[in-house]
């Protein structure tokens, strides 16, 4: 949206943002078309993706890009115009593109651009965040409509955005089960977890956030948007938090880990979630769904560990760290290691 939207408190406020809670909704419908027909060409021509520099495609990569765009736009607009009037094709393209753009944009806005999400900045003017990776994902992300099976199916699990971030390689059909583990872990260790009860509640929260950020700075700088119907696990009390570890090293701790030390990285959380899932069939009867959940998290853990092999510091931490688990889970943890 560029300058047309103020979605984070750090962005500069302009006079027309006063009405962004009204005019942004129809503009969301342009997102898909802008990406497809303009954004990709702009990124290739300038060698940037947003503020980041990327190498421009050359040789066969450039040929593949151009050929892909020709085929894509040809199938989307060219072929239909061979059998239908051009204006009919453009009308239906506009309808589909607007529906896709609004759906795509709103789903991600409800997870991040609401009053319940944090907008932290790097500390000491550098590139390091105050919270660890997993805690950062929890504080900056909000789930919505977790109990709606229809919406979960239509969105492919993107209403479980927190789990989508913490377990990027786990299949989305396991998100509801993993969300319960994440929520219980947050409650046990005092890490905040937020979730709107319904899709409508999430839309209302995003509307309030847009209106809040559009107000003059003098009126909105110290005011918080009204709280919606959101299920939240509050942060741990300062005294209890200080007893465990310094605030700058607060992390999402695993339920099986000792409270005397934090989990060193998010992959330990993946491993511990697996031990919990693996213990369920023994207690509640083995089911195909539970076995699939175990397999999905195990694969996610393995790939995540492989992705960190090139980082010597993380590798040393992984080699020296051991998660104390209950006796019933020892076999599963051993097989993972």
Image (spheres, rainbow, N blue to C red):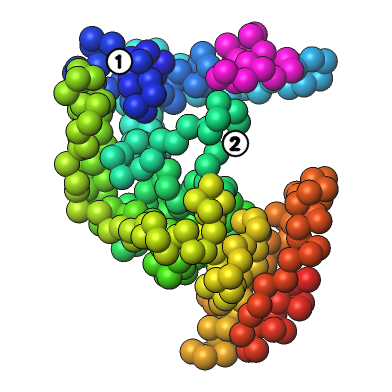
Tell me the quarter of the image containing the C terminus.
bottom right
Q: Is residue 61 left or right of residue 175?
A: right
Viewer-side label of 1, 2: 2
**Of 292 and 194, the residue lying toward us:** 194
Q: Is residue 103 left or right of residue 33?
A: left
Tell me the quarter of the image containing the N terminus.
top left
Q: Which mark is residue 13?
A: 1
Q: Quadrant location of residue 268? A: bottom right
Q: Which residue is mark 2?
A: 128
x, y percentage for residue 134?
54, 52
Give me the residue at 83% from left, 48% from top.
Answer: 312
Which badge, 1 or 2, is on the more N-terminal residue?
A: 1
x, y percentage for residue 97?
39, 26
State the SS at label 1.
loop
Q: Is residue 58 left or right of residue 152?
A: right
State the SS at label 2.
loop
Q: Which residues are magenta?
A: 41-56
């Amino acid at each position: 949206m560029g300058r047309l939207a103020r979605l984070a408190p750090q962005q500069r406020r302009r006079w027309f943002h006063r009405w962004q809670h009204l005019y942004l909704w129809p503009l969301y419908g342009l997102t898909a078309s802008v990406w497809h027909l303009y954004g990709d060409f702009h990124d290739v021509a300038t060698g940037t993706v947003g503020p980041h520099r990327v190498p421009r495609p050359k040789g066969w990569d450039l040929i593949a890009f151009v050929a892909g765009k020709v085929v894509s736009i040809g199938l989307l607009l060219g072929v239909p115009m061979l059998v239908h009037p051009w204006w009919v094709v453009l009308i239906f393209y506009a309808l589909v593109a607007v529906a896709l753009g609004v759906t795509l944009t709103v789903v991600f806005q409800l997870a991040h651009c609401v009053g319940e999400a944090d907008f932290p900045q790097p500390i000491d003017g550098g590139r390091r965040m105050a919270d660890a990776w997993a805690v950062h994902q929890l504080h900056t992300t909000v789930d919505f409509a977790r109990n709606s099976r229809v919406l979960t199916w239509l969105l492919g699990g993107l209403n479980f955005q927190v789990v989508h971030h913490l377990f990027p390689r786990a299949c989305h059909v396991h998100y509801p089960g993993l969300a319960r583990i994440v929520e219980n872990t947050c409650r046990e260790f005092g890490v905040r977890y937020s979730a709107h009860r319904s899709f409508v509640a999430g839309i209302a929260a995003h509307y309030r956030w847009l209106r809040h950020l559009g107000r003059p700075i003098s009126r909105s700088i110290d005011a918080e948007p009204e709280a919606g119907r959101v299920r939240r696990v509050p942060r741990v009390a300062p005294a209890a938090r200080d007893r465990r570890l310094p605030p700058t090293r607060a992390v999402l701790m695993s339920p099986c880990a000792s409270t005397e030390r934090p989990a060193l990285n998010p992959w330990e959380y993946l491993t511990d979630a697996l031990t919990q899932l693996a213990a369920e069939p023994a207690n509640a009867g083995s089911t195909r769904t539970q076995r699939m959940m175990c397999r999905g998290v195990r694969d996610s853990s393995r790939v995540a560990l492989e992705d960190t092999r090139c980082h010597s510091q993380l590798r040393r931490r992984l080699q020296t760290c051991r998660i104390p688990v209950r006796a019933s889970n020892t076999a599963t943890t051993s097989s993972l290691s």
